[in-house]
Image (cartoon, helix red, strand yellow):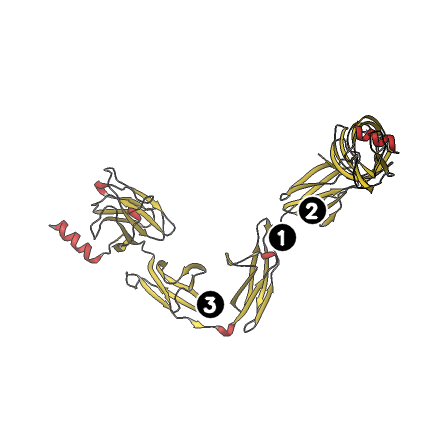
């Protein structure tokens, strides 16, 4: 009966003192699911979910004894101790090397598994204080320590005087909280009245180049720009950016004025670039725009860059480099001499073929390891003298006069020889098909149209390269007829037209390496 009476008295008072340690409050946190959430729940030896008691206390170093049911576990958090106890636990003994012992504290409510409770533990050196402000969510600082935004619940404050500063925009308050032993053991409530201090504030606009982040009082407040109101006085902002060293800027705020501040941008991290070229006097453009001196060690901000290398008479090239903080990136760039006479290329071009009944020539071909294969077609422009046609019945009756133009399809093979850097010669052996197209100049009948002959040609293609990918060519060659159809033979016997002959083609060729 005495034990039951003791438990009843404890439940009513909810506060026990023993050697300086006391419990000021104990309650069930109805909406707190910490003890029943995966990751924060614990189980006792029987596999049952433990109850969690969040002990609010300003100190550490406590030992806990749960009697015969024991303790499931403890965890120290930023402002409290998490104590896990078995369901149906009844009492707790708390000991501390400095503050003494609270023996056999009986819980005033039933302890259930998977539920969360709160205990306010007083170590006997002060009182718990809840701080409120007339402007909600104001920043609260006590004795120089920033506590957060109001209201501040259950802050343990030692006996004595405590300086409080609260701020919310242009509203401020400076006050003193006095904690004494005569204060009630329940949580003390201190309300801080705030005043409008707009006369002491100025508008502030902080700008920074390069879209850098602006930090103030340990928080990022803007990127590139920050607008706010600050009390008169001196302030410091810090600008930050990836791959840069932060830079601080201090400025003074003049009240009731607009203060425009240009903050120093963060200093980019830099690295070095050391390039050696062969040949040595090559030029380089950074990102295709800025020329740089390759004879000097270049210091560049951290990042990735493209360098375009060039030198007259050499094939240009582009390289990409990544510059890292405080490191030197080195490279040797060898430029390849321009090959004007290309051993491997395909080409096409046009020219004029000078010969009896010459014309415009189109050609295309390719060289592979200097072996040249070429196709060409000459569109005849020059006409022959009129050729008179007679009957073959023995009467030699006059029929018509026809003039002819000659078109030639040719296939040539050869081997390219580089004479100088820009001059080459390709001896060629070819096969040609010549075809005559007729036009009646007198009479009514067209005879000999499409007459054809085949020829073998031997010659040489001379090329000169004034610039890369352009040849000027001259092709002298001698063509010998090897076969003619009857019409071609008849035309040749009756005119100055003959299969083959000497000819020279001149023109231009565009060539592309592969």
Q: Would residue 194 appear left or right of 479 to someone viewing this image? A: left
- Cα separation between marks 1 and 3: 32 Å
Residue under pointer 2: 299
User: Quick check: marks 1 and 3 in contact, CB under 8 Å?
Assistant: no
Quarter location, residue 337: top right
Nearest the eye: 296 or 326: 296
Circle 3 Cα neighbour tier, 10 Å, few/some/many (<14 / 14–19 / ≥20): some
Foreground: 257 or 469? 469
As drawn, 391 above or below 135: above
- Measured in 3D between alpha carbons, the distance from the residue under mark 1 to the one under mark 2, in whole angstroms, is 13 Å
Q: Residue furthest front?
A: 395
Q: Residue lying furthest top in this view?
A: 482
Image location (x, y in percent) of residue 371: 76, 27
Extreme-left residue of the structure: 1
Q: Secondary structure at mark 2?
A: strand
Nearer-N-terminus badge (1/3): 3
Tell me the distance, in whole angstroms, between the alpha carbons under discs 2 and 3: 45 Å
Quarter holding the C terminus?
top right
- Whether residue 210 is visible, yes or no, is yes
Q: Is residue 95 visible?
A: no
Q: Are marks 1 and 2 in contact (CB under 8 Å)?
A: no
Query: Where residue 121 is drawn, which disc sits there?
Result: none
Q: Vertically, is 133 above or below 31?
A: below
Which element carries disc 1, helix, strand or loop? Answer: strand
According to the picture, the residue beneath numbered tag 1 turns out to be 267
Q: Give the x, y percent position of residue 163.
A: 42, 64
The disc placed on residue 169 is 3
Query: How far across and how far down the image is residue 154, in percent?
Result: 33, 58
Residue drawn at x 28%, y 61% as measured from the top left:
186
């Amino acid at each position: 009966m005495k034990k039951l009476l003791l438990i009843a008295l404890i439940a009513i008072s909810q506060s026990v003192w023993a050697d300086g340690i006391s419990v000021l409050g104990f309650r069930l946190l109805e909406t707190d699911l910490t003890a029943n959430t995966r990751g924060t729940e614990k189980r006792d030896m029987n596999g049952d979910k433990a109850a969690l008691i969040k002990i609010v206390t300003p100190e550490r170093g406590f030992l806990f004894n749960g009697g015969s049911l024991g303790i499931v576990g403890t965890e120290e958090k930023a402002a409290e101790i998490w104590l896990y106890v078995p369901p149906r636990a009844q009492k707790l003994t708390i000991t501390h090397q400095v503050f003494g012992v609270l023996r056999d504290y009986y819980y005033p409510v039933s302890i259930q598994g998977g539920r969360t409770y709160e205990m306010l533990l007083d170590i006997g050196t002060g009182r718990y204080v809840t701080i409120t402000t007339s402007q909600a969510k104001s920043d609260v600082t006590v004795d120089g320590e920033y506590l957060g935004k109001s209201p501040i619940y259950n802050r343990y404050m030692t006996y004595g005087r405590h300086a409080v500063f609260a701020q919310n925009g242009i509203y401020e308050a400076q006050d003193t909280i006095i904690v004494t032993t005569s204060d009630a053991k329940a949580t003390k409530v201190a309300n801080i009245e705030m005043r409008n201090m707009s006369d002491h504030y100025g508008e502030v606009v902080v700008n920074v180049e390069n879209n850098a982040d602006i930090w103030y009082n340990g928080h990022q407040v803007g990127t590139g720009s920050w607008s706010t109101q600050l009390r008169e006085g001196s302030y410091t902002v810090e600008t930050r950016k990836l791959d840069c060293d932060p830079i601080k800027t201090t400025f003074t705020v003049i009240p009731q004025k607009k203060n425009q501040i240009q903050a120093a941008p963060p200093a980019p991290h830099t690295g070095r670039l050391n390039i050696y070229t062969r040949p040595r006097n090559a030029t380089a453009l950074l990102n295709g725009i800025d020329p740089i001196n390759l004879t000097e060690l270049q210091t560049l901000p951290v990042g990735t860059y493209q360098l375009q290398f060039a030198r007259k008479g050499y094939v240009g090239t582009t390289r990409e480099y990544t510059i890292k903080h405080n490191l030197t990136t080195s490279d040797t760039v060898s430029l390849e001499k321009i090959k004007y006479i290309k051993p491997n290329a395909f080409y096409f071009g046009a020219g004029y073929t000078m010969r009896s009944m010459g014309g415009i020539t189109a050609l295309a071909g390719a060289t592979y390891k200097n072996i040249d294969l070429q196709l060409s077609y000459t569109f005849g422009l020059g006409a022959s003298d009129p050729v008179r046609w007679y009957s073959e019945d023995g009467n030699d009756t006059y029929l018509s006069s026809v003039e002819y133009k000659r078109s030639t399809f040719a296939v040539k093979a050869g081997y390219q020889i580089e004479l100088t850097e820009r001059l080459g010669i390709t001896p060629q052996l070819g096969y040609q098909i010549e075809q005559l197209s007729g036009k009646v100049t007198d009479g009514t009948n067209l005879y000999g149209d499409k007459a054809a002959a085949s020829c073998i040609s031997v010659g040489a293609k001379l090329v000169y390269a004034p610039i890369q990918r352009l040849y000027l060519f001259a092709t002298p060659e001698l063509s010998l007829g090897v076969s003619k159809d009857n019409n071609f033979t008849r035309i040749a016997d009756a005119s100055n037209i003959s299969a083959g002959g000497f000819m020279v083609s001149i023109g231009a060729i565009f060539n592309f390496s592969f």
